[in-house]
Amino acid sequence: MRSDKLSFLGPQDIALLLRNSQRRRVSRGEVIVREGQSPEAIFVVHEGFISVRAGDVTVGYFGPGQVLGEISFLERRSASATVVAEGDAVVDRIDNADLEALLSAHPDLSARFYRSLAANLSRRVRELSQNLGRLRSKRGGRKTRYGQLSARHVPRGLVEGLSAVHREIARVEESLAARRMSQPDAARAVASACDRIVALLEEHTSEKALLEISVDDLLTFRDMNRVREGVGSFVFRNCFSLIMSSATMARCYTKPSGTPEDDETSRIIFDGDAEGDGLVGPLVDEWFLGRPICLVRRETEKQMAAEIARRAQARGDEGPLFVTSIASGRGDELLDAMDEAGEGSIVATCIDADPDALRRGNQQADDAGHLPFMTFISAEPLALSDTGAEIDLLPQHLVYALGLFDYMADDDAVTLLDWMHGRLGPGGVATWTNLTASLPDLLLMEHLLEWSVIPRNADAVRALVARSRFGDAVEVRPGTSGWVNVVTCTRR
């Protein structure tokens, strides 16, 4: 037992507690406490790591010196989660009855013990609050969608262009209802109209166009970014009903899980099955699912599955490839790689903040027969640097993240890179992707879907990695489309 985990206890207090405990050795996978049962004891981890699981998803890790079961002890309630040994471990069990008798007989020890528990619980609440604050600052709130431009400042060409789009959409809808137009012809017409919206955004948010708007009233417009946002908001308001008729774009905009690319949205984009409202909605959805951003996401997932399988097969008789994915939801690409590489050739860990996505991944892995080789851990990727020391991973051959760095500021990205570096064995690689500024959908994403990303070119990526523990051990290559960079960092 380490006194720094029960910080107000001295060496004599620790020795006294140990005399009233029973030391227990547990093997990997052994259940120590089962959800819904009363443990009737608290446990202190002596060696190894213990995981806490809600259903099939790991929600926390405890290492040497950390206390489990204190909430059940304090509240006299059954366990709210299952506690399992992640590997061979040793725990000290102190029965509640013995602990209560000991604390009653030693009032000074009792005061210090309860103060230690209070400090531990307070720290956990504080860390949770910090993580929530960090997430709120990353995700932000809704933009103000009115008032940036008065009617007289909206370019006439933009107004006429959007009016033409609406007339074309109305014509298509009327023709479909009257069965005067085939579905392929309607799809082409809707795609052309939606392309026109993107073209109008590009045209009227260019530097030249913004300057022309600004000079009309120099007293009103002093900030070019405000003018740019005004143009985007005008297009958004005029096209909102059309954009929201697409099931995928509506989900990206509403962000039901707090991010435009949650696990369910990613699956919709990957499957590419168009859905929407009315006669035109599915055609708008079809257009969006064919856009570069969706093509990039499908491309990178397929390439990662192939890369994982290739690395696993290349190992031959050297043993399985140990892989960790970060923020990849249910980990479909891992299942595809396992199917390709063969049973037992890959041992995978999926870390994601969405426990529902992990539960779906757990079920899919079970259905595919790969569950013995997969572990699902619920953890917020932005907080891995705070909790990572408690996640017990064997040295990994590959740690990867698809799309995550698109949302991370430089400092957070460097912190995550350092975490990835620490989880790799010598020669192991961290692979991740980052959108580039050449992606044609950046304006569509920003102004119509409130989908903000941080694109980086190759030089920016190298500069970012140079700040991390990887240093200059980095390779940056463009994806097949050229709209995304695939980055590989090697631990030397």
Image (tube, rainbow, N blue to C red):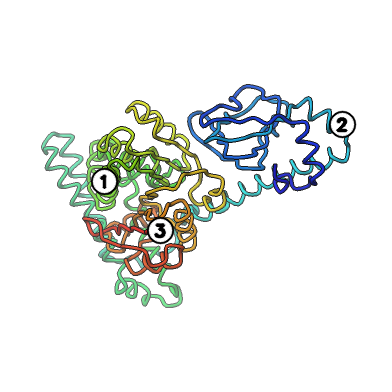
Is residue 171 found left or right of 118 in the rendered image?
Answer: left
Is residue 164 found left or right of 46 in the rendered image?
Answer: left
* Kind of residue sitting beneath label 2: Ser
The image quadrant where one finds the N terminus is top right
Depth check, mark 1 against mark 2: the one in front is 1
Circle 2 residues within 10 Å: few <14, some 14–19, many ≥20: few
Q: Quadrant of residue 318?
A: top left
The image position of residue 489, as x and y in percent, is: 37, 59
Judging from the image, what secondary structure is the residue with disc 3 in? loop
The image position of residue 202, as x and y in percent, is: 27, 63
Circle 1 residues within 10 Å: few <14, some 14–19, many ≥20: few
* Disc ID at residue 300: none
What is the count of numbered marks?
A: 3
Depth check, mark 2 against mark 3: the one in front is 3
* Disc ID at residue 104: 2
Cβ–Cβ below 8 Å for labels 2 and 3?
A: no
* Kind of residue sitting beneath label 1: Ala
Q: Quadrant of residue 265?
A: top left
* Disc ID at residue 314: 1
Judging from the image, what secondary structure is the residue with disc 2 in? helix
- Which badge, 2 or 3, is on the more N-terminal residue? 2
* Pick the front one: 481 or 201: 481
Q: Which residue is mark 3?
A: 491
* Point 40% across, 72% down: residue: 224
The image position of residue 203, as x and y in percent, is: 26, 66
* Pick the front one: 450 or 333: 333
